[in-house]
Every structure is written in C-alpha cells, then in structure tokens.
Amino acid sequence: MIEEKRLLVGVIVKDEGAAKSAIGANNTLVADVLARLISAAGGLHPESYRKGHKKGFALGRQTGFKEAQSTAASTQNTSITINIEDIRSDEPEHIGFDGLLLDDARLNVTPALVKAFKADAVAKLGEDHLPTDEQWKAIIVAATSAVTIGIAGTGKTFVMMMRAIFLHCYLGIPLQQLKILSVTKDCRLDVIGQLTHLFSLWGVILSNEQALDLVKTPRGLMVSLIRSIAPLQEVVPFELMGVLDQGDEDGRPFDPRLLPDQMDVIEQAYQSAYAQSSSFAESVQKLFLSTLPLPRPNSDNPQFVAYSDKGFAQLRDDEVITRALTGIWHSKGEWPMEGLEPLSTSLDVVGNSVLTNGYVEILGAHIVLGYPKGADRTTMRPGSKTPLYEESLAKRAYLQRYSPVKIIWCDTPGQLNKMLRAAEAMATHAPSFQSRMKGLERPMGIAECLYQTGALIETLGLNPSQAIAKLKFMPQDPDAQFFDCTAKFWPLFETHLLRSTPRMMTFNRLFLMFGVQGNKHLKAVPTEVLMGMRNILTDELQDISFHVGEFIKACMAENRHRIEVDEVSSAAISIFACGDDFQTAHGTQGATPKYLTDFKSHFPSKGFEMNLLGINFRSDQGIIHAAHSLVLGIPAVSKLAPVSVSSKAEHKPVPVYDLNGGTFMSLFDQHYASGAQILILAANPDDYRNSESFINVVLDRDKLENPNQRRVRVRAAQRAKGLEADVVFIVGDFVASTSSWAKNQIFRRAKTIATEDQSPFDVIQQNELYRLAHIALTRARRDVFWLIPREPVDAPARLRASTRIPSATSTFIDYR
C-alpha cells in the first residue's frame, strides 16, 4: 500500500511563464534575506534607504503574490508527472532481543546513602572493625552484576554480608527479595550466625526462620522451590534420602560417602536393572568374569618385578612348592572344596611349566592356591631357606606377569566360594563384586561404583549414556566394559528412583529441569517463591557445578521476564558474587570455576564491575607466603599474594614434621595449654586413619574439659573453607589418584576449565592438590604445622602436594 511506502516524488513543471514568475518571487525573497543579513552584520544604510527598502519589500510581496495566483490558475491544465520509487532494501527485517541477563539500570546508590552507611558503620562496628577502602568499594558498588575476588582471609564473606545490609537497610530491598547462597552446610550456618549479629547492630532482628530462609545452599533452595510445585511436592532428592525428614535440606555436596539407606536403594536399582534389561545383565556378566583373574600388572613397580624374577628362578621347585601349599589347605580342611574337582594341570607359561590346582568351566579360569590368610608366614618347606609365604608371592607375580590364560589366585576358601556362588546365580541374580576401574581412591562395590561414575558425569553437565557412547578405549582396556555397564545402568537407575515410594530424583536432574530447561519449568514456580532470587549474593562461586550455575541464571532470567514482560511488579534485580579460583576445592568432583572466572559473560549487564581484595585479615605473612608458594603457576584471576595486616614484621616459615603420635602430641600439648583454638585437617583418608588413635585422645580430652565450648575441631581439608583457628594441624599429604584415560575424555568434553591440555582431569587434580594445601594452610591465624608420613620405598609413584616444599625453602622449614 502507498501509505506504507517511503515516496520519492518528482514534480516536473512544463509551463515556462509560470517558471519565470516563480523565479521573480524567489528573487524578491533573496533581496529580503540579503537586506536582513546586512542589518545583522551592522551594515550602514541611510534612513531613506530603510524606508525605500520597506516600501519596495511590501510592493515585491504584493506583486509576487499576484503572479503566484496567476501561475496557479494557468497551470491547472498543465501536465504534471509524479514518479513513485521505493529506495529501501529488499532484505527482510528481524526482530532483536535483549541478550542481557540483567536490565541496564544501575542500583540507586546515591552519595547521601553511602555517607549515611559509612557513618552508621563507624558507630555500630567501631573504628577497629570497619571495612577497608577496597572493601567499601565492593560493598557499595552500584552495578547490578558485580564480583569480588580475593585470596583466603581477605574478608570476602564479610563484604558479602555488609552488601546484604546495604541492599536491605539503605536501598530498601525487602528480605523476601534477597538470597545469600553458601556452598556447604557448615559455611551456611557460619554465615547465618555472623549475619544475624550484623543485622541486629542495624536494628534488624532476624528470627531463626527468617535467617534460614535468607541464607541457603543451592540444594536447600531447590528443596524450597519444588515444595511450591504441586506435582513435585512429594519428591525426595536422592542425596537427602534419610536426612530430609530430619530437617537437613543441605546434605553433603561433593561428598561421595553414601548413607546405608542410599546404598540400599542403589543395590535395589542394580538388581532391578539386571532383571529387566538383558543387555545390561550381559554387560555385567562380562564385567564380573573379567574381574576374577589376576589383574594386569604394573611392570614399572620395582617390587613386583623383583618378585616375578624370583618366581622365574624357583620354577625348578614349582611342583614341591605347589604340594606344600596344597598340604596347608588340606590340613585346615579347606581343600578340596565342595563343588570343585581338584585337578592339577600343567600350564605352559612362556616356555616353562607351572602347576595349577584346578579349572572352573563356568569362570573360564584356572585355580591356583596361594598361602592361606591367617596361617603362620614364617613356615618354610623342607630344604628351603625362604618362607613358603614369600615363595607363594613370587609364583603369583610370575603368573600375573606372564600367564597367557586367566588365573584365579585364591587366598581364602570364602573368596573362591563367593565367586562360584555368584557365577552359578548369574542367571537370576546380579553378581556382587568389587570394581577395578582405574582412578578409584578405594575399593568399591560394583553397584556403588556404577552410581558414583554416572553421578560424576551428570554433575559435569553431561548425559551419562550419551557421554559414554562417545568415549574411545584402547583394545582390551578393562575400563571399557565397566563404562558400557554404566551407560546402560544410569537411565534404569533414574527410572527406578521415579517408581520408588516416595518418588526420588537426583539433585542433578532437578537442577537440570529448572536450569538448562528452566524456561519452561520455572513458569510453574509462584512469584512469591521466585522473587527470593531477584537479588542474589553468593559465596565461594568457584565451587558450584554446571547445573547450579545454570539454575541461578535461569531463575534470574525468569524474574526479569516476569517484571518487564508479565509486569508482575517493578523491582531491582542484581547478583553479587564472591570467590577465589585459587580455592577451587571440588574440581575433580564436578565443580567448575568458570562462573567466577567468566562472570561477566555468564551474568551479563551493562553495569558489570569486578573488585579485587588484597589485604589479609587472618594469617601472619609467613603463612600467606607459604600457602601462595604452593599455587604459583596455577592460572587464576588474581595472582598477587595478599598482604597481612598482622603487626608481626617477621615472616616465620611453616614447619613440616614427620607424622607420628609423639610429634603430634608434643606440639598439640604446647598450644592447647596456651588456650588456643585448634583445627585438625585431614589431607587424605588413609593418613588420617593411621593417625586416628592419637587424634581421638585429644578430642576426648577437649570433650571432657570443654563440654560447652569445644576448642578442638576435626575436618577433612576439602571441607574446611570458611573455617579458621589460632593453630592448624595438617595431618598427611595431599595425594592424587591414578590417571584415567576415560575421565580425561569426559572432562575434556565437559570443559569445566579453560585448558588446551588433552588430559584435563589430570590437570585439575594436580592443581587441586596444591589448592587444597593452600586452603588448609590459610585456615590458621597464628601457627600451622604440616605433619607428613614417611613414604615407603616401594610405594607407587603418585603426585603429592608436598613435592613443592623443597622448592619453597624460604617459606617452609622441613624438620623431617
């Protein structure tokens, strides 16, 4: 339609007389303009000229008007041509969308409000507890998207709490539109205690219910959300099974330990999957049979090589050794076994004859009797100067290294009986056995291992079945069969949870529903519940998982949509985060620092601002330097070591001792007697287990002497963030698990860290060792002692955090 077009109209006049009349009128106008310009420029002209000009001007206008009338009359019959032309582009136009998570507006932070807040802070906190200038800058930032980064002890959590007071007491944001997120339950409770006190100084008295609603873990926030949606009100997050009904909505994120009730559900799901899926059952059977024979050896282990060489040297006595070992089993009444025919068979092992004790058709393997567990290990056969136990180990190493066929080495009758019964029952019952997947920190039953592996992949933001389908394995890699089982188990496991009573879902699945898929499921959340996520303050942002990060973003996007599109109500939306990527403590378990390091891209706003904190209020400078020396070279946003506010000028190095009861008790007694608060941190489960006897002594002593105000606490170093004490004892070394080709592939696909390395899992766990040591050291205000056990000569080569101590001689003093 012509109304929708931009028109280029050309008028062509074909009457010459009319044209001249138009020119005459134009000349009169030009004369008038020139006269006015002369007057404006201060030109001189006599009064007679002025009168003549005025009279001429009037005559000209009158003449021109008459000529124009005459021209109009004469051109009524003149031909006029109008050309209509569309000069716009033919390219189709597209509607644009706002790509910002937050709107453009900045918070209404005025100089008057800031002045009032600072004046009140002086009166309520006192001069000695005021924020520093760099902390004030972070607290009062007007940007709707702001992040504060600072190494341990720089007061990030204090800044976050002061920010909450600023938002509520000065910017007028209701508590119902604020949410503070802490990663763990311990940190949450600490923040609640400190925040309640701070708010009371400003005259805001938080009830226990208000405080628990204001400060949440991501898990607790999800529980509140699903309780507001009718179809999900009865769903129990699997990770909270057995504790939710006791009021615990947080559980233990990134803690792989399972409660007995949870283990029962996993075992039931394993048996159910085996019964209903022939494909899964077949995979499990193959995996079970592959775990029975002696595992592939590590030929780089010098002790193993020495034993296998000794086994080769004693082959001339193999028949005598075999009879001697069989005789011990006979004497104990444990051979022959029921249902197993004893049949001595000679095997050809790289050209040498080796005797076995039988062959089990259902297992497809030869049986060889070893030295029975519990028997006297000093027993020697006639004519030998070597204990029969040592000769048995040598034969085992030789067969493990060179045997071309499957060998089941038997140390106890119960071990073999269990294998036989499981194999016989495989037609109807899923076998129970220990997994041998590479990279496991401890032996793990097959059902639990399937769950833990699938849960880790899901925490990384991947679909377990799809991610495993894209893995590539070397031929004959034993991990391949295990991951095949995991891919088939996971969807059956989730189905089992949904069919349980009560219905269950994993937290990963719930966060997926309201995070990545949040645009449709968040529509069901009532506004009064969702508005709690309008202004988010989150601590330790470097330790959240992919699903939690996307959930936070989805809630903020939905809040903005309801305010600006649905016009629910006008309100401020903002996010304020604190963190330190040097303290990423759960990367091997699926946490990612990318929401902190790439904060601006994940939480886009025109008002973005980042602040760095560099003053440490907790530790002495010597502790700070020692901790920082361990993380040098690891990529981080802020690489500078903070400066301690401690008045001590000396930079005292951190002492390192051998881990033993005598040293620990001597150091402990000295500081406990001085009235110090003491924190004992376990670097790894094995070293702590070996130290538990003397640690329990000091715990019992503290419990007896200080029943109401305990001064000694014990934590795993991995869960120590947010804690501090006068004196810290680090018990053990931080040790990496063995490398896993499959895990490296999975982490490479998940991209939880920015690296071009083809083994990202190895990079993550290596850096995590040093970060955990850094975290442990910086819990101390005054003194820290690192006690490390002596490493056995034959211990397997593993990456340890203590290996950096020799290169940091100015920050550590090694008494080992």
Image (tube, helix red, strand yellow):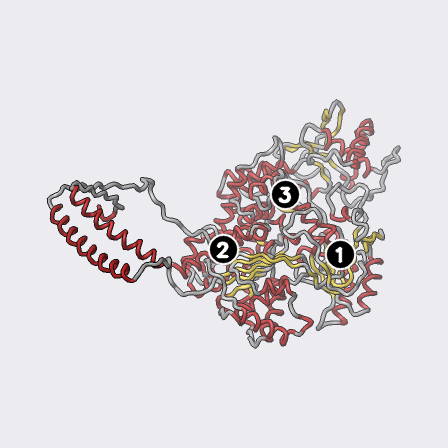
From the image, tell me which residue sits under label 2: 605
Q: Place residue 123 in its image quadrant.
A: bottom right
Instruction: Give whichever of 326, 726 is nearer the camera.
Output: 726
> What's under tag 2, amino acid-wise?
Ser
How far across and down, in percent of the image, does residue 156 sit?
A: 63, 61
Q: Place residue 779 in its image quadrant.
A: bottom right
From the image, tell me which residue sits under label 1: 730
Q: Of tags 2 and 3, which is closer to the observer? A: 2
From the image, tell me which residue sits under label 3: 761
Mark 2 vs 1, N-terminal side: 2
How far across and down, in percent of the image, does residue 804 sit?
A: 76, 47
Q: Residue furthest top?
A: 351
Separation of marks 2 and 3 at Cα, in angstroms: 32 Å
Mark 1 vs 3, N-terminal side: 1
Q: Look at 48% across and 53% down and name the residue there.
A: 515
How far across and down, in percent of the image, does residue 671 sit?
A: 81, 65
Q: Look at 68% across and 62% down and name the residue there.
A: 723
> What's under tag 3, amino acid-wise?
Phe
Horizontally, residue 587 falls left or right of residue 671, namely: left
